[in-house]
C-alpha cells in the first residue's frame, strides 16, 4: 500500500548541530513480501567496523553520527542524507557493517520500505535516503517514520563552502576544521583557525603554505581554500599555484640578487620555512649579490663557505620536535649540517659544537622513538614508515600513473642533499620516512618491497634474496600482471648499464652509496661526501631518472636506512652466542643471552620486529658509538636520527 506524498521537505543547511536522531518503537512486520532486488547492497559474510580514513571511507566525523547504526545488531535505521554527506566509498564502507539499501527519491523509498525492509526481521538494515525531499524525520511517510527503529539526519559540521575541503582532509586536519567551525561562522576565520594562519602576517602565511607543501598528497581543496584568504604575495603565490613554487622561486632569486622583492618581509620573518624548502630541494639556491641580507640567507646561496654555512644553520635550527613531521624537518636540517661539515677539506672549527647539538637531539629522539614508534607505524600520514611506501604508490597506480621506485641503499639526508644537487635532479615532492628497526638492509629494505612489517617475513629476516618475489606478490595481489612488474638491483658503477624500467611498476635497487659507506674507514663523512659527489657526477642516477621521466614514469627515490659516523667502543667477546655482530647493533637468539650483555648497549624490542618468532633480539650501540676497534667508521643498524629517518622524494631529471 502506498501512503500519501508529503506536501514538501524542510530545509536545513546549518553546520553547528551535527546529526539528528529520532528513535521510534518497534515496527510491525508484513507477511507475503518479496525482497526488492534493485538498489540493495547485500550484507557481507561477517559484520565488521567500517574502514576509517580520509578521502571517501567513513571518517570519524561521519562515524560519530552513525554510531546508532553501528551499535545496533537488528532492526531498521533510516539515514537521511539530503546534503550528500555519504559518498560512494562511504556507503560501500558502511555496507561492511550492515545491510545497506539505497533510495534516491520518493518512489525508491516507498518501494524499498514496502518490498524489502518490512520483509526482513533477521538482521540489521540501513535505508540511506539521498534526496532533498527528506530533510527531517517528519518529511518521511508517517508509517516509515514511526516503524523505523531510528531515523538519523546526517549533517555537515562545516559551512557549504568548506565541504569539499573537509572530505579531502586527513583526520587531524578534518577535526581541526570541525573544531574551528564550532567557534567561528566566517569561512575565512574557520580556515585560518584550523590551519593556524595569522592572515596578513607575512611570516605566518609563509609558514602555513610551506608546512603543507612539505606534506605529500596535500589536496587541491586546501590550496583553493587558503588562496581565498591569504593576503601576502609570497604565500599567496604558492597557494594560488596549488603548491607550485615557481613564483616563490622568482621572489627568492630577486631577493638574493637585489635585496628587495615582494616576498622580502616573508623571507625575513620565516627563515625556518625557507630552510625547510631549501633542505627538501623544492627551493633552489641562487647567486647572492645583494648586501645587507640576514646572515642565514647564505644557506640558500650558491656555493656558500662550509664553515659559514654551518654557523648559519645553527641560527635557524628547527624548534624542538614533538611528532613525526617535526622530526623529519629536524633530520633534514641536521643532514644539511653534516653535509656542510663533510664538504670542508678539514673539519670546520664549529664541528664539535655541531656534534654537541647532535647529542642533545639524539637523546630526545631515542626517548620519542621508544614512546611513539609503534603508533607511527600505524599512522595514516603519507609515507609515515617505509612499509607504507608500496601501498601509497599503489594509489598512484590506481589513478593511472606508471611508477619507478629507486631505493638507494644506505642513503641518509647527509648524502641526499648534495646528491640531488650534483645529479641535477628536480625535486617535485619531498618528505621523510621512518625506517624499520634495526636499520639493517635485510630488515628495512625488505619491508619496502613487501609493503609489510618485518613480523610478516620472519623466515627471511636475515636475507634480501626474497625481496624481488615479495615485490611481485605485493603488486599481483593488487591486480597487476607479472609482465607489468619489474625489479633490478645494481651497484650503479661505470660498468653497470642503466636499468630499463618496464611495465606499470618498476623498482631499482642501487647499492653505490652503501658500498661507499662501508669503504669509508679513513676520513669518515668527508670520504663519503667526496665519493658520493663523484658518483653523482658519473651520471648514473641522472640518466636513470631522466630516461624514466621520458618514458612517462613517475619516479620516487628513497632509502632503506641512513648512516652515522661512529666512534669506537669495545667489542664484546661473546663468540658464537651472537647471531649477528654488527657495528651498530648485535642480534641475539634469545632474551637471556642479550640480557647478559645489557651493559654493552641499549636493550629494546621495536614494534613490528618478530623477536620471539625469529629469535631476533637486538642490542643497540648507545649514542654515537660503534662496536669497532678504531677510526671513524660510517655505519648503520642503530636507532639514531641519522639512521632511522630517511628521505622520500618524487623527482625528475
Image (spheres, rainbow, N blue to C red):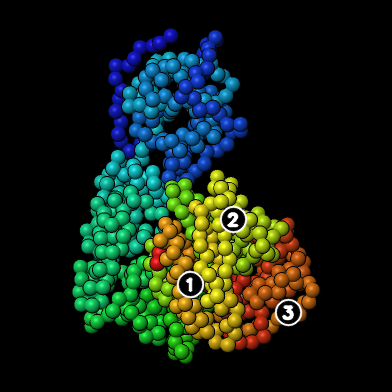
- 278 relative position to 601: left or right: left
What's the residue at 47%, 70% (across, down)?
541
Q: Residues within 10 Å of mark 3 (few under 14, many from 20)?
A: few
**Badge 3 element:** loop
Residue 332 location (% of width, % of height): 45, 70
Q: Earlier in the sequence, mark 1 or mark 2?
A: 2
| Foreground disc of the pair 2, 3 | 2
Image quadrant where one finds the N terminus = top left
| Residue, disc 2 | 471
Task: Relative to 561, say whether 169 is above or below.
Answer: above
Asked which quadrant contains residue 278, the reply is bottom left
- Mark 3 — residue? 572
Secondary structure under tag 1 reads helix
Position in image of residue 263 (x %, y %) = 23, 68
From the top left corner, tell me how far across and down residue 162 is, in percent: 31, 44
Up/down of 244 relative to 399, above or below? below
Which dot marks residue 540?
A: 1
Where residue 180 appears, as percent x and y from the top left, is: 34, 48
Whichever of callouts 2 and 3 sits on the residue coming sooner in the sequence is: 2
Amino acid at each position: 500500500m502506498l501512503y500519501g506524498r508529503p506536501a514538501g521537505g524542510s530545509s536545513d543547511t546549518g553546520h553547528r548541530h551535527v546529526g539528528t536522531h529520532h528513535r521510534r518503537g518497534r515496527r510491525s512486520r508484513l507477511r507475503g513480501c518479496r525482497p526488492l532486488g534493485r538498489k540493495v547492497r547485500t550484507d557481507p559474510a561477517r559484520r565488521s567496523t567500517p574502514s576509517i580514513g580520509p578521502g571517501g571511507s567513513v571518517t570519524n566525523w561521519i562515524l560519530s553520527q552513525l554510531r546508532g547504526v553501528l551499535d545496533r545488531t537488528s532492526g531498521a535505521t533510516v539515514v537521511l542524507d539530503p546534503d550528500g554527506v555519504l559518498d560512494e566509498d562511504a556507503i560501500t564502507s558502511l555496507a561492511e557493517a550492515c545491510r545497506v539499501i539505497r533510495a534516491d527519491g520518493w518512489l525508491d523509498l516507498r518501494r524499498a520500505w514496502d518490498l524489502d525492509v518490512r520483509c526482513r526481521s533477521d538482521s540489521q538494515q540501513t535505508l540511506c535516503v539521498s534526496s532533498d525531499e527528506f530533510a527531517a524525520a517528519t518529511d518521511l511517510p508517517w508509517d516509515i517514520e514511526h516503524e523505523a527503529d531510528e531515523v538519523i539526519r546526517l549533517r555537515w559540521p562545516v559551512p557549504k563552502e568548506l565541504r569539499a575541503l573537509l572530505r579531502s582532509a586527513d583526520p587531524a586536519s578534518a577535526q581541526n576544521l570541525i573544531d574551528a567551525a564550532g567557534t567561528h561562522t566566517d569561512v575565512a576565520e574557520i580556515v585560518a583557525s584550523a590551519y593556524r594562519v595569522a592572515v596578513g602576517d607575512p611570516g605566518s602565511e609563509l609558514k602555513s603554505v610551506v608546512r603543507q607543501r612539505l606534506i605529500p598528497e596535500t589536496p587541491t581543496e586546501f590550496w583553493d581554500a587558503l588562496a581565498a584568504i591569504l593576503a601576502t604575495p609570497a604565500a599567496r603565490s604558492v597557494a594560488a599555484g596549488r603548491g607550485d613554487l615557481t613564483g616563490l622561486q622568482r621572489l627568492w632569486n630577486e631577493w638574493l640578487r637585489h635585496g628587495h622583492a615582494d616576498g622580502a618581509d616573508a623571507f625575513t620573518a620565516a627563515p625556518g620555512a625557507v630552510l625547510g624548502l631549501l633542505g627538501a630541494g623544492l627551493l633552489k639556491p641562487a647567486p647572492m649579490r645583494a648586501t645587507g641580507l640576514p646572515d642565514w640567507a647564505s644557506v640558500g646561496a650558491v656555493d656558500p663557505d662550509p664553515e659559514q654555512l654551518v654557523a648559519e644553520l645553527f641560527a635557524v635550527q628547527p624548534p624542538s620536535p614533538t611528532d613525526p613531521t617535526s622530526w623529519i624537518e629536524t633530520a633534514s636540517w641536521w643532514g644539511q649540517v653534516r653535509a656542510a661539515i663533510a664538504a670542508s677539506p678539514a673539519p670546520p672549527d664549529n664541528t664539535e659544537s655541531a656534534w654537541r647539538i647532535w647529542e642533545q637531539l639524539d637523546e630526545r629522539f631515542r626517548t620519542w622513538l621508544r614512546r611513539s614508534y609503534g603508533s607511527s607505524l600505524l599512522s595514516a600520514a603519507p609515507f609515515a614508515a617505509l612499509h607504507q611506501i608500496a601501498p601509497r604508490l599503489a594509489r598512484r597506480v590506481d589513478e593511472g600513473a606508471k611508477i619507478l621506485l629507486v631505493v638507494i641503499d644506505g642513503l641518509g639526508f647527509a648524502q641526499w642533499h648534495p646528491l640531488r644537487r650534483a645529479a641535477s635532479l628536480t625535486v617535485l615532492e619531498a618528505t621523510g620516512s621512518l625506517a624499520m628497526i634495526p636499520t639493517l638492509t635485510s630488515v628495512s629494505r625488505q619491508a619496502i618491497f613487501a609493503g609489510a612489517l618485518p613480523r610478516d617475513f620472519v623466515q627471511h629476516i636475515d636475507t634480501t634474496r626474497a625481496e624481488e618475489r615479495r615485490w611481485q606478490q605485493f603488486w599481483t595481489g593488487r591486480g597487476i600482471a607479472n609482465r607489468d612488474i619489474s625489479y633490478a638491483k645494481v651497484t650503479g658503477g661505470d660498468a653497470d648499464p642503466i636499468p630499463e624500467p618496464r611495465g606499470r611498476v618498476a623498482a631499482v635497487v642501487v647499492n653505490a652509496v652503501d658500498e661507499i659507506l662501508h669503504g669509508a674507514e679513513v676520513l669518515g663523512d668527508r670520504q663519503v661526501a667526496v665519493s658520493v659527489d663523484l658518483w653523482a657526477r658519473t651520471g648514473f642516477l641522472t640518466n636513470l631518472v631522466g630516461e624514466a621521466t621520458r618514458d612517462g614514469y613517475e619516479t620516487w627515490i628513497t632509502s632503506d636506512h641512513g648512516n652515522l659516523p661512529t666512534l669506537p667502543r669495545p667489542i664484546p667477546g661473546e663468540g658464537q652466542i651472537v647471531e649477528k655482530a654488527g657495528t651498530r647493533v648485535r642480534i641475539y637468539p634469545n632474551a637471556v643471552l642479550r640480557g647478559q650483555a645489557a651493559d654493552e648497549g641499549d636493550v629494546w624490542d621495536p614494534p613490528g620486529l618478530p623477536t620471539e618468532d625469529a629469535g631476533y633480539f637486538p642490542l643497540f650501540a648507545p649514542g654515537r658509538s660503534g662496536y669497532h676497534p678504531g677510526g671513524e667508521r660510517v655505519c648503520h643498524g642503530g636507532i639514531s636520527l641519522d639512521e632511522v629517518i630517511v628521505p622520500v622524494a618524487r623527482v625528475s631529471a
